[in-house]
Amino acid sequence: MKSFSAWDYVVFAALFVISSGIGVFFAIKERKKATSGEFLVGGRQMSFGPVALSLTASFMSAVTVLGSPADVYRFGASFIFFFISYFFVVTFTSELFIPVFYRSGITSTYEYLQLRFNKPVRMAATVIYIVQTILYTGVVVYAPALALNQVTGFDLWGSVFATGIVCTFYCTVGGLKAVVWTDAFQMVVMIGGFLSVLIQGSAKAGGFHNVWEQAKNGSRLHLFDFDVDPLRRHTFWTISVGGTFTWLGVYGVNQSTIQRCISCKTEKQAKLALYFNLLGLWIILFCAVFSGLIMYSYFKDCDPWTSGIISAPDQLMPYFVMEIFETMPGLPGIFVASAFSGTLSTVAASINALATVTFEDFVKTCFPHLSDKKSTWISKGLCLLFGIMCTSMAVLASLMGSVIQAALSIHGMCGGPMLGLFSLGILFPFVNWKGALGGFITGIALSFWVGIGSFIYPAPDSKTWPLPLSTDQCVHSNMTTTVSREISNRLEISFTILRMDDYPGVNSCLQNGKDINPLLIRPVCNLFCFWSKKYKTLCWCGVHHDSETEQDYHENGSAWKQGSGYALQNGLRQGNLSHSPGFDPKNKSYSNMASESEKITYL
């Protein structure tokens, strides 16, 4: 087994030193702005550029760097159809979810659920988010470290604890600004790592033309498979449609995404951040796909996986890197830095998001009159706490292998119902808290039923079998040739996450649209501007929906609503309904110039 040189460790260490340095820089720079708003959401004055890079880096984790090329290597380049999923996900998030979250002036995504429904719905969603995020983040730290350790000899526990300590450090001392700018730096490192593999790998494989021909001959370019069987691993429908719902749960309602979007100066800047992030997603996707094709061209006559050189598919990319950079010390370190950049950005975003939802949904609810200084120190303490918990989860994953797949599955099984819950609130004005909570619980139950069933009765091997792989030219002197080892014993990073939506539909779960704050909904008819006024009015279910009414709502308060039913039903304090991020008629955009004390509040 090839191992790292001293230069590789130097490059890897530089990633952690620079990341920590960014945290220290913002800790010193922002030391006089001691408020929880500055620490958790950057004072709501971020620009779209660094936020766009941060969003891309956070959700293109080491799972992408290691797993996506291996997926293309085994199953072909149909993975490229994720570019369709990304387009629809970013469009729906920008035009459907962001306007509602931004204009309501929330800090925690789950505040919306109390504004729209009630406190129990908010608490249920918050608890589930915290649990699933801790589980998932621990696996994100451990799984890539294990894959790299088994192929490169890179120290397993050194990388696990270094990741946990560094992420916790710069999250705790620098807050969201440190997370965003560190992510931006790590995004550059990720692209640099991919480019080094693309250039050197294509040279080793005989050039891009030869790579393309070999991939074509090996059936890796058979893209268009329109089979509607949902058990098939990679078809046009499972990737474009299934991928859209999978990533919409990650982008549309995830605290990590929304928190950074609402930290932007204006709603327009938040949307720009998402659309520029789309370019980043496409760049990483194309790099991953071409890396997989190059890797196939290089290993076409001796597959290291089926020949037994490596024990799991997620080790293919590290093994390939060690092969092509064998005589180039330092360059394997760039790739490992690229993989761990994905890990650092994902973990840091998770820690910051966990601290934010805990502070906003629990601490501020129990202690509403905390001073700015205490709020900041509590926020920092929460970052430290969750950093320790996520690192501990990584240790637990190492002791119990089954925890890894369970954590990934729980993350997926909770995502669909969570997306359904927010979609109900935003798209359907007639749904009240009973329908939302009932549908959410039902969705969770059904997701776990199907998810557990998939463990007991997995899809047939014929549905997930990889494309042909050859070992004809392998030298078998010092390797295991047993190909029939159990798939369940491999550490395989899975990209197939089940999503389910919930659909409550009983009369007791309905309410009058006049009881709904128009800032909290965005019915589906808004996405189709050609619809007539008659149909828009019908879909809005009695809510005052025209733009003039919404602007008057900002300027004149809540005069449109009479009585106390709304306050009781939705937990809103009527006296504060008019306070939310301001609308700028000149720029036709909402801004975050309003102070924290002026946002919508609730009992």
Image: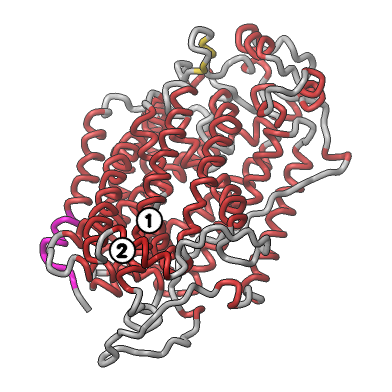
Quarter of the rendering occupied by the C terminus: top right
Of the 4 image quadrants, the one containing the N terminus is bottom left
Q: Which residue is mark 2?
A: 210
Task: Determine the residue positioned at 63% across, 58% down.
Answer: 226
Above/below status of 2 relative to 266: below
Q: Is residue 428 magenta?
A: no
In the image shown, does 177 or 60 lie closer to the viewer? 60
Quarter of the rendering containing residue 13: bottom left
Q: Position of residue 42 (x, y in %)?
A: 37, 29
Query: In terms of depth relative to the viewer, which is nearer, 434 or 179?
Result: 179
Q: Position of residue 335 (x, y in %)?
A: 25, 58
The residue mark sitting in front, 2 or 1, is 2
| 305 to the left or right of 579 | left
Instruction: Tell me the residue at 17%/51% (across/down).
Output: 14
CA–CA distance in space, label 2 to label 1: 18 Å
Looking at the picture, which amino acid does disc 1 mark? Ala
What amino acid is at disc 2?
A: Asn
Measured along the vertical axis of the image, is residue 472 above or below residue 81?
below
- What colour-coding does the image apply? secondary structure
Residue hosting label 1? 288
Residue bounds of the magenta highlight: 3-13
Q: Is residue 12 magenta?
A: yes
